[in-house]
Amino acid sequence: METWDAITSRRNVRSFSDEPISPEHLDRILEAGRRAPSSQNTQPWDFVVVTDRAQLRRLSTVWVGAKHVASSAATIALVISDDPEPGRRVQFDLGQVTMSMMIAAADLGIGSGHAGVGDQAAANLQLGLPPGRACSFLISLGYPAGRPLAPIRKPDRKPFDEVVHRGTW
């Protein structure tokens, strides 16, 4: 898939087929995240990949909006230091990691969805995180059930001229 097609095909997928993702494709998605830019090149993240069905079901309970994790072929937990000092900078970096992984997945025809984490203790337990670490986000992955990824011709987005301002507002 061309880069533009991957960008325009990417959508939040929360219903997945039973088809597994090959280890090579998972590694490519993880590599896209590893290569994401970060503030001052701090790379403040670690990734925990979960593919075990029972563990995915348990992980899906850490946030009300994470139910799709249970049926994913794999979910990547984005893990950071639980030190609040870095603040927004780390969240911006994680946003770049998330989009890099999601676009890489779309390029492979793999759907993705994201979720936050509300129950940090449950997430830490399920992921076996060491002290001082926290799970910030989850990215569920799998082949879309129903309709495959394809460029979205009429996205449900605000009109271009309503959000783009040139030079001044």
Image (cartoon, rainbow, N blue to C red):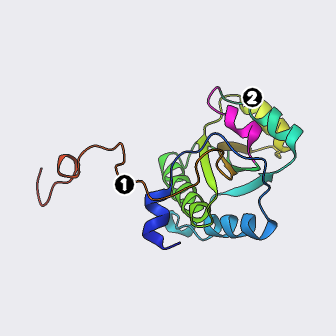
Residue 66: percent from the left, percent from the top?
66, 34
Residue 166: percent from the left, percent from the top?
14, 59
Residue at the bottom extreme, as displayed: 2
Q: Which residue lies at the image location 23% right of the left edge and 47% below the top edge?
A: 159
**Disc assigned to residue 61:** 2
Lateral position of residue 57 relative to residue 92, left or right: right
**Disc assigned to residue 95:** none
Residue 32: percent from the left, percent from the top?
61, 68
Q: Which residue lies at the image location 72% right of the left edge and 67% below the top edge?
A: 25
Q: Secondary structure at mark 1?
A: loop
Amino acid type at circle 1 is Arg
**Stretch in magenta:** 64-72
Between 20 and 105, which is closer to the camera in this rendering?
20
Q: Is residue 158 above or below residue 101?
A: above
Residue 65 sits inside the magenta stretch: yes
Amino acid type at circle 2 is Thr
Q: Which residue lies at the image location 70% right of the left edge and 43% below the top edge?
A: 135
Q: Quadrant of residue 55?
A: top right
Which residue position holds label 1? 153
Depth-wise, is mark 1 or mark 2 nearer the camera?
1
Lateral position of residue 8 relative to residue 82, left or right: left
Residue 67 sits inside the magenta stretch: yes
Does residue 94 appear in the picture of this structure? yes
